[in-house]
Image (cartoon, rainbow, N blue to C red):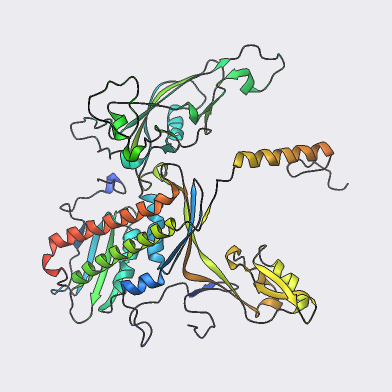
Amino acid sequence: MESVTGYPRNHVQVLPERIGAVANSDFPGHYPGEDHTWDLERFKQNMNLQVDRLTPSRIEFDLIGIDASIANALRRICIAEVPTVAIENVYVYNNTSIIQDEVFAHRLGLVPIKVDPRRVKWKQPVGPDGVDTSNDENTIVFGLTVDCTRRANVRRDETDPERLYENASVLSSKIEWQHKGRQYKHLNLPRPADVTDDGLPHEPENGQFDEPPQPANDDILLTKLRPGQSLNMLLYCVKGIGRTHAKWSPVATASYRLLPHIEIIQEIPPHLAAKFQQCFPPGVIDLEYDERTGQKTKVVVANARLDTVSREVLRHEEFQDSVRLSRIRDHFIYSIESTGAYKPEELLPESIKIMQTKITDVEESLKKAFPNHFPKN
Amino acid sequence: MEQPSFSDAVEREVDGEKITILPGHSADYSEATFCLWKEDHTLGNALRWMIMKNPDVEFCGYSAPHPSEPKIHLRIQMYDNLSAITCLFEALANLRTLFTSIDEAYQAALADNTYVIEEDTDIKARVAAIAQEAAERRARGTNTIGDVPMGDSTS
C-alpha cells in the first residue's frame, strides 16, 4: 500500500538529507478501517525466515515480517545474555614478562574459551561465610607455564627473536586445560588416564564425546618473552554473560540491517546510464540492451541487497527525481558471528530460550501477585 | 539459573519480586505503571509493542528510568475500565507464542538445506597472498601501497 509520498507503507524512506517514516505504525486504531490486532496465524503467514549462508563461525539469515522491537530483542540477547565461559580469576605464581600481572590477567580474560556453556553450572558468588563456591561443575582450570630460553645452534647474525629464542611469543595454544574432580562426566569427555574409574557407567552423549576445553583460537598472541623471563599461572574460568563483561559475549558480531530497496521512477537518459550505474556498488545496477540506442543503456535494478545505501545517486541533480531509495522496515538481514563456544546456528535458538525465560519469570511473578487478573479463557 | 544483575552495587531485592506496581494506579487497575526488575529494553520494547497490538489499550509506553538501576517502568492505560494486568498477562502469552513460532521457522529453514555452506575466509592465506603480491611488485620496482618512497611525488 502506498502513502501520499509514493513510498510503500513498510518502507523506511532514504532521503537526501534525512531518513523518513522510521517508526512502524501497524497498531490498532492507527489506520481507519484496518485491523492490526495481534493475530498469531496472520503473523505466521507474514513471517518468513531464510538462512542465506552458514560457515563454521558465521550465520546469515533473513527474518522477514517482524517488528524492530522483536528483531532487536534477539540481537541484544545474542550479545549480552547468552552465557559463555571465560577466564575470571588468574592466580599468578610467577610473571617476569614485560606485561604487569593485572594487565596480563585482563588480557587472558578476553581469550575466547571453547567449552559448551550448557555443560557448566553457574558459580554462585562467595557466601557471607567467605567460603569459595568453586567446584568441578562450575569452574574450569587452565594452566599457563612458559619459560623463554636461548636456542642453541643459531646463526651468529640472526636477528629474528622467533629463531633466536624458544617461546619468544606466547600464544593461546600454550594454555593447557587441567582436569579437576569428575569433570570428564560433566563435560562429556572420555575419562583421562590419570583419573580413577568410579565404577559407574560413563557413555558419550549422543554417541560422541566433546572436545576437551581449550582456547577457541590457538594463535592469539598473549605476550612476548625474552630469555630468562617466565610465566606460571593458573586460570580459573567461570560461566557469565556479556552484560557483566564483554569477555562473556558469545558473539564477535551480532547485527542486522534492513534490506535496501531501489525504485527507478523516471527513465534514466541513455547518455547518463553509465554514470547512474557508477553511483552504486558493483552488481546493484545492470545495464541491459536498449533497442532504441542499440547499446546497453537500459537501467535496471539487478540486486538491491548489495547496495550500501550510500545515497551517492542523490548527490547528482540529474538523478534526484529519477530514483526512490528506501529500506524495507520489516526485512532484517542478520549476521551473527560466534566466538567459538557455540556453533553459529545455535545462537538464535539460545537467544529465544532466554527470551522465553524472561517472559516466564514476569508471568510467574505477576500470577503470584494478581491471580484474579489472569485471563479467564 | 541465577543470572548476575546489572551491577551488584545497585542490586535491590524487592521482596524477591520480578514485577511490582508503582503507587498511583487506579483502583480497578485499568491504569497502572509496572516496574520490571532486572529487565531492560530487550523485554521492555518487545512487550510494549505487543501490548500496543491490543485494541483495548489506550496507551502503552515504557522507560528505563536510570541506566544504573536494573529496572524498567511499563505504563498501561486501558479503555472501558478493563484490567491492565490482564492485558499484560495476554501480551506475555502472545509474546511467548511469537518467539516460539520464530524458533520453529528457524529450525525449518536450517533443515531445508538450500543455503550456502562454506568455509570461513582463510585470513592467514589472504594476508600471505597480499604480502607475496607486494613482494613481487617491489621486486619489479613498482611502487605499492605501503611501500611508496618518500618525496617521490614529482617523478
Give the answer, above or below, for where B86 lies relative to A172. below
Vertical side of B108 occupied by A11: above or below: below
Where residue B104 sits: x, y (%)?
35, 60
Residue at the extreme top of the image, as rendered: A152
Position of residue A366 in the picture relative to residue A319 (left or right): left
- List the single residue furthest toward the bottom: A33
- Residue B153 in view of the camera: yes
Q: Nearer the viewer, residue B9 or A345?
A: A345
Indicate whether A117 appears above or below B112: above
Number of callouts in the render?
A: 0
Q: Position of residue A78 (x, y in %)?
A: 40, 52
Q: Residue at x 46, y 43 (%)?
A: A339
Q: Nearer the viewer, residue B145 or B26?
A: B145
Determine the residue positioned at 22% across, 24% down. A199
Q: Position of residue B28 (x, y in %)?
A: 13, 74
Place residue A197 in its image quadrant.
top left
Q: Work out which residue is located at the far front of the displayed protein and give it.
A: A207
Seen as rendered, the residue at the extreme right is: B155
Picture quarter with the C terminus of chain A:
bottom left
Image coords of residue B16 (percent x, y): 17, 52
Q: Is residue B64 visible?
A: no
Nearest to the observer: residue A129 or residue A8? A8
Q: Is residue A138 above or below residue A21?
A: above
Residue at the spot 31% in from the left edge and 46% down from the top edge: B7
Position of A53 with respect to B36 (left or right) is: right
The quarter of the picture where residue A340 lies is top left
